[in-house]
Image: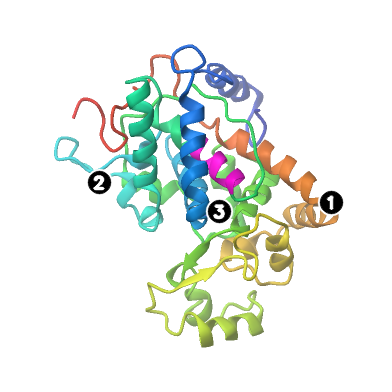
Amino acid sequence: MRQFSCIGFVILGFLGLVCSVHADLRMGFYGQSCPKAEKIVLDYVKEHIPNAPSLAAALIRMHFHDCFVRGCDGSVLLNFTSSSGNQTEKVAIPNLTLRGFDFIDRVKSLVEAECPGIVSCADIIALVARDSIVATGGPTWSVPTGRRDGLISNSSEALAQIPAPTSNFSTLQTLFGNKGLDLKDLVLLSGAHTIGVSHCSSFSNRLYNFSQSVIQDPALDSEYAANLKANKCRSISDNTTIVEMDPGSFRTFDLSYYTLVLKRRGLFQSDSALTTSSTTRAFITQILQGSLANFYSEFAQSMEKMGRVDVKTGSTGEIRRQCAVVNSS
């Protein structure tokens, strides 16, 4: 995974607060101020993603990582500067394998050329993530806009708040719940693991060093583990080899990820963790019993929820001129 409407683990008083924070997001926010903005984003995605389809998975992952730290505010894009003095989210362990920063910068430059200082980097991430998945044949979802860019980015917050591939169910439930996302959202958003790849370092402990008393994770199918050891991650020190998260189907946004999870062939501990709760396991079963179209519809709802997490609107934050630096620096 290190690789949202208003429901979840929240009390009613907090619920009202969350909804009011989201009120300024709306479809077509730039309809008057920059009417070509969304078409500029879409045209660039449609031109380039078909030639680099693996970027779609990287860009939706970037959107996820951005929203889980200080909300969907583009803080994941900020570089370290001597004036701020702090290490930013970009250099945190969960984000060291993020890709697509240059892609976002190129889209931003095109939008800035059309409408200087109008469209936020946070909105560009959200739009690019959606359009990239659609360009590879995956689901679409609504992306209301009006997010503003954050001014703060801390690596320690990214490390603490982004769910790790080694997370157990309790940790996942807490981290998603902290963002107003429920267990159904957890299962559906994990479904994005149906596309893309991972480095061995994200799961090699399951093969070589699971615990003090157990070398290999017993929750991982032994045949699958043997195949990974023989053909992919030949040592625990391998930090460069990449592995498909949904072998045989990693370019197709389909249901096979969930089939593999139930077969104990999910690549990460966080994938396996979905089977340790009767609630999340039941959600997986329901997804597999339904149609691909139904999964797409439900996935869309969870993506829309995630895209509204702790957004900055109105006069909060700023509209960055360049996505990697705040305007004052």
Please tell me whether residue 130 belongs to the stretch shown in magenta: yes
Name the residue located 46 percent from the left edge and 39 percent from the top edge: 44
Mark 3 and mark 2 residues within 8 Å of each other at the beta carbon: no
Numbered disc total: 3
- Label 3, secondary structure: give it: helix
Residue furthest to the top in view is 32
| Magenta part, dominant SS | helix
Expressed as whole percent of the image width and height from the top left, the position of residue 176 reads 57, 44
Q: Amino acid at mark 2?
A: Gln
Mark 2 and mark 1 residues within 8 Å of each other at the beta carbon: no
Q: Which residues are magenta?
A: 127-135
- Distance from disc 1 to disc 3, alpha carbons, whole Å, reads 28 Å
Expressed as whole percent of the image width and height from the top left, the position of residue 34 reads 44, 18
Q: Earlier in the sequence, mark 3 or mark 2?
A: 2
- Label 1, secondary structure: give it: loop
Q: Amino acid at mark 1?
A: Gly
Residue of label 1:
290
Quadrant housing residue 266: bottom right
Seen from the viewer's position, the closer of residues 116 and 236 is 116
Tell me if residue 45 comes above or below residue 29 in the rendering.
below
- Distance from disc 3 to disc 2, alpha carbons, whole Å, reads 25 Å
Tell me if residue 241 comes above or below residue 272 in the rendering.
below
- Look at the image and tell me whether residue 179 can be seen: yes
Seen from the viewer's position, the closer of residues 107 and 254 is 107
Task: Estimate how packed mark 3 is, as few (under 14), some (14 to 19) or many (20 or more) residues with alpha carbons within 10 Å.
Answer: some
- Look at the image and tell me whether residue 2 can be seen: no
Residue of label 3:
171
Residue of label 2:
87
